[in-house]
Amino acid sequence: MNNDILTILAEAVMDAGDALPQLSMTCKRLRVCTMPILFRACIANHRVAMMEEFLPKSLWPYVQHCLRRGPETSSTPSSTVDSLLCDAYEPDMLRHALVAMPRLRSIKALCHAGTGHGLPWDVLQAILTVPHLHQFTCHHYLFSPREIPTDRLVLAGPTRLTTFRYMLNTYRPSPRGHAPERDALSVVLRTHHETLEVLWLPTETAPFQTLRSLKWPSLLELRLRGELVQSDNSLLSALGNMPNLRLLKLDVALPRDTSPQPVWPPGEIGTYSWPMLEDVQISFPCMDDQLYGHLPPTLRRLSLRFFPHRILRRILRHCDCPVLEHLEVEYHQDDEEDDLVQELVSTFPNLRSLKLLRYRQPQAASLDAKRLGQLLRPLELLTEFWLYADFVITPRPTPAFKYGGHAIDQDAIDKLHDANDEIANALVERLAPSVELLKFLQPWDVNVHKWDVWKIMREGSEGRSPRAVYDLMLSLGDQADKVTVIQLPPRSQEP
């Protein structure tokens, strides 16, 4: 058996518990074949400052993905001289080790969401000048929050960064950002704007002026998250320099006493176009936004959230997206709900998945699931329907000495599960036969929600009605990229 076949077998058993480590210990030849797979990804503990201490040099040739995990507590470590900067990294040793890992392609620096401190510029410089690095993620760390002299604020080296993600805790306290971060981010963007394909930034520190002044020939994905920043059409000007964009996600929150801003203001003249755009997700959309009238007919996914019906319906009328396959809308229920659903169905007849996040008006009647299913029946290609119905019985966190002071009553969660089961079986009687899965948003614990999945069973014999059956395994396997806000211990570990 040649080495290529052995490598394929090793890849096949990679996720089968400890099967691969055991396989690697059977003989030298298998050990040599499995080393690049076993040590492809590594995690560095924050207590270890030197690379040699957490990973022997003999393994460096195999590392492709490195996660450096910071403190697990929300308080700044006492060893830190500057409370705004993390001292868990030694820049020179860090760069020496990273450069000596020839297969290294991605690095992620992660710390606890509540630490409130950041990575110094010399540490970021050591990481971002590794010649063979393609992806960097800064998660919860601030990005060089202290002012740096201009002559030191540089990046040099033949790097080709394709992915840059800077993500902060959405619920972090003030200040939401630091001015020096904007300067540091500007240096990164100026250095890599021609090669970047994926870019994630917090709105509070995003250097919009730099974004607007550069060309982005390779950028495929742009995500901005944070509070809405009042600016002079800077976002449209920046988007105009991103002709190959495929995904645009503007996940912004409106500060008190502010109004939504259009991405493309009314009356603004321009020749902007995004012919490859496939996925648009916008919170707090503006009904006068000209962007929706310029979306390409090839758009396949659209998510619009937080607005009244009349605004949503007006926006939808501007969209000419005949092949749209995935739609997500969030709205407050009112007397025009049926009209809204009918307009969704007639505007986007080729939907394969539909997600409705529906917020009930006070004292409103319960959801008429059969009526909703009948309205959605013309969607003959629909395979997945996601629903949050905001039932009266939807449990809310209550004070308790548990998980930071709050807990959710398990009996209330069970009652909601039963209600979702009833809704699922009422819906399946009316929805098109193409529907395979129904998913309902279910509180699981404090600030943790999950999508519970019902599978549609359609027996072949005549006279048997289809039924929806809760699928535990699909529900457990459907949580990786969903609505988890704070990760809590499993219920089996409850005191």
Image (tube, grey):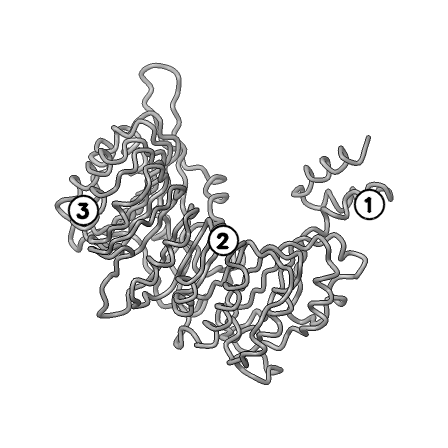
User: Disc 2 to disc 3, how far (Cα)?
Assistant: 31 Å
The residue that label 1 is drawn on is 32
Front residue (pair 263, 170) = 263
Give the secondary structure at mark 3: helix
Is residue 256 placed above or below 21 in the rendered structure?
A: below
Cβ atoms under marks 2 and 3 closer than 8 Å? no
Could you say which disc has been placed on residue 198 in the image?
2
User: Disc 1 to disc 2, how far (Cα)?
Assistant: 34 Å
* Circle nearer the viewer, 2 or 3: 2
Residue at horizontal 32%, vertical 65%?
A: 228
Residue at horizontal 73%, vertical 64%?
A: 97
Q: Residues within 10 Å of mark 2 (few under 14, many from 20)?
A: some
Is residue 494 placed above or below 378 in the rendered structure?
A: below
Could you say which disc has been placed on residue 84 in the image?
none
Q: Residues within 10 Å of mark 1 (few under 14, many from 20)?
A: few
Task: Report x, y in % for residue 441.
Answer: 36, 48
Type of amino acid under label 1: Val
Q: Earlier in the sequence, mark 2 or mark 3?
A: 2
* Circle nearer the viewer, 1 or 2: 2
The residue that label 3 is drawn on is 314
